[in-house]
Amino acid sequence: MNFTLENIKYKEILDIPYLALTGPGVTCIVGESGSGKTTLLKLLNNLISPDQGQVSYNEVNLEELDPVQLRRQVVMFPQSPSIFPGSIQDNLQLGLEFAGKPLPSVTELNHALDLANLEKPLDAGVEELSGGEQQRLALARLFLLEPEVLLLDEPSSALDDTTEVLVLNSINNFAQSREITLIMVTHSKAVANKYAETIITIHNGRVIGNQEVAVRG
């Protein structure tokens, strides 16, 4: 997997002459609030298009790819993911229906909940879940999609410190076990230093750092 951004300008938010993101592995994008981190993720998912320049995925211009097919391979997890009325099982299955994928077994659904550290029965109503639990439900739905690339925008922002560690470990282990590329926006340098193999630093819409992190034992 590789993304290439060339001569990118987007409004007054991003100005990136060149950036390459390769996988599999974990890349963290760090920078202060308003620096353009989330906008960069949206470009990779073709949720927005650059005003100037080109974004390529596996050497193909995103403008030449079917956006629906792209988003089945390159899945974005926003800060406030959508949760639908109904049960936990309804929400897990809806994600797969939208992606045009076959429905998994109950065992597979429960395994996804385990990966996301959500200890709730499948028939529990989503109205019973806290904000952090709803975010973990959305993560479980994401795991079931098994994409090539996960784009995560502050995936632990609604979680307490203990749950944050559990969830980030689960995300990291999931990506490693399936050789999935993980590109994660985070405000936390500690999170980036713990999980990333590459750290991209953005300031005022420009890439000011591109650091390879030593492989951890």
Image: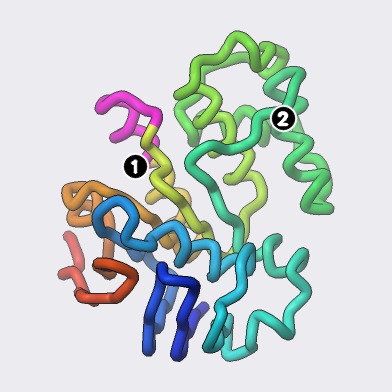
Residue 147 image point, x, y percent: 62, 59
Residue at (46% x, 56% y) in the render: 175
Q: Is 19 or 9 nearer to us in this picture?
A: 9
Residue 214 image point, x, y percent: 16, 70
Q: Which residue is mark 1?
A: 169
Q: Amino acid at mark 1?
A: Asn
The residue range painted magenta reads 158-169
Query: Between marks 1 and 2, how big is the CA–CA gap?
Result: 23 Å
Q: Quick check: 139 left or right of 123?
A: left
- Residue closest to the far front: 12
* Residues packed near mark 2 inside 10 Å, few (<14), some (14 to 19) or many (20 plus): many
Residue at (73% x, 18% y) in the render: 87
Q: Quick check: 94 left or right of 129?
A: right
Q: Which residue is mark 2?
A: 91
Q: Quick check: 177 left or right of 43?
A: left
Q: Amino acid at mark 2?
A: Asn
Residue at (41% x, 77% y) in the render: 21
N-terminal label among 1 and 2:
2
Q: Which mark is residue 130?
A: none
* Residue 20 higher or lower than 99, as above or below: below
* Residue 122 higher or lower than 181, as above or below: above
Residue 17 image point, x, y percent: 37, 88
